[in-house]
Amino acid sequence: MNTTHELQSMVAKGNEDDHVSDENNVSSLTLVPRSMLDGSTAASRLLQVELELNLHLRRLSFSEPVHYIYNPLEYAWEPHRCFVDTYCRSGQTILFLGMNPGPFGMAQTGVPFGEVNHVRDWLKITGEVGHPASQHPKRLIKGLACNQSEVSGARFWGFFRKLCGEPDMFFRHFFVHNLCPLMFMGTTGKNLTPPELVSGEREALLALCETALCQAVAALGITMVIGIGRVAEQRARRAFSAAGMKVRVEGLMHPSPRNPLANKGWEGVAKAKLEELGILSLLSM
């Protein structure tokens, strides 16, 4: 089977460079002129990078074991843009970098590590969510009404909520982003990470994502990237090295419940790592 990347269009037919479209999206998301993203703010610069990446990703195709592809930067654009507009600001120099969406996190909310309760109740993100063109019956998109919690996202945002109290304290110096916006699934609905894809397809995908990462980091003025999980860390190092960019890259254990070490106390590990990197104090300043 060859699965083409048939996600609903973010770019209107006949004028792909100028508008974001709601084609095939039951939410009827509003058309967004590219001219509104004038690059005058950190948020608009990041959104420009993401819209451009979406255009390139739609041209890719994926074979077995991939049967379903979700791109929340298309069908969950409204809450994603709310997150970026609200929290992506000038002066942020440290970027936490995840790999790609989880089925009950960013896939539902459009927010990296976007466990629904924290996104809705702490970050106060709003926005209408549509759905992919083709959904697995076990992985339906319910948006901010999703009643299943993602462990990784709950651990990630829960940790910073405890440290910071209010979101503004976290986002003074930090932002959160995913290297790849796509979620992949097999016939059973099993989540497939990018390393599990066919090598040539994986490298074509990640080459585009790494270029976009470099563009985003340059646009935002990021000086340190902290990869959440080894793959995100390694791909960030590779991207900046290839681009000749001097960006400090560090790594932090992924909070996934699949990780036995994370299940023994991820918050303690994360706090110790941030202290080691000399940035823990930035979360209370």
Image: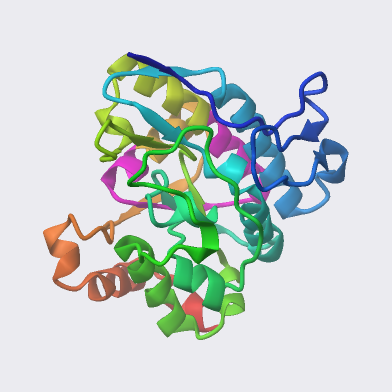
Q: Which of 94 and 8 is in front in this view?
A: 8
Q: How is the image coloured?
A: rainbow
Give how far across and how far down residue 41 sits, in percent. Answer: 78, 53
Measuring 37% from the left and 39% from the top, which residue is drawn there? Answer: 136
Q: In this view, does 51 lie above or below 242?
A: below
Q: Nearer the viewer, residue 147 or 205?
A: 147
Give how far across and how far down residue 178 sits, in percent. Answer: 47, 47
Q: Can residue 175 be seen in this view?
A: no
Give how far across and how far down residue 199 sits, in percent. Answer: 29, 18
Q: Is residue 128 above or below residue 201?
A: below
Can you tell which quarter of the image residue 172 is in?
bottom right
The residue segment tinted magenta is: 211-234
Can you tell which quarter of the image residue 21 is in?
top right
Measuring 21% from the left and 60% from the top, which residue is drawn there? Answer: 257
Q: Which of 285 and 107 is in front in this view?
A: 107
Measuring 34% from the left and 62% from the top, which residue is drawn there? Answer: 150
Which quadrant: the C terminus? Answer: bottom right
Magenta span contains residue 227: yes
Whether residue 253 sits left or right of residue 243 in the image: it is left
Magenta span contains residue 222: yes
Can you tell which quarter of the image residue 90 is in?
bottom right
Numbered disc total: 0
Q: Main secondary structure of the magenta part?
A: helix
Measuring 47% from the left and 72% from the top, which residue is drawn there? Answer: 118
Which quadrant: the N terminus? Answer: top left
Q: Can residue 51 be seen in this view?
A: yes
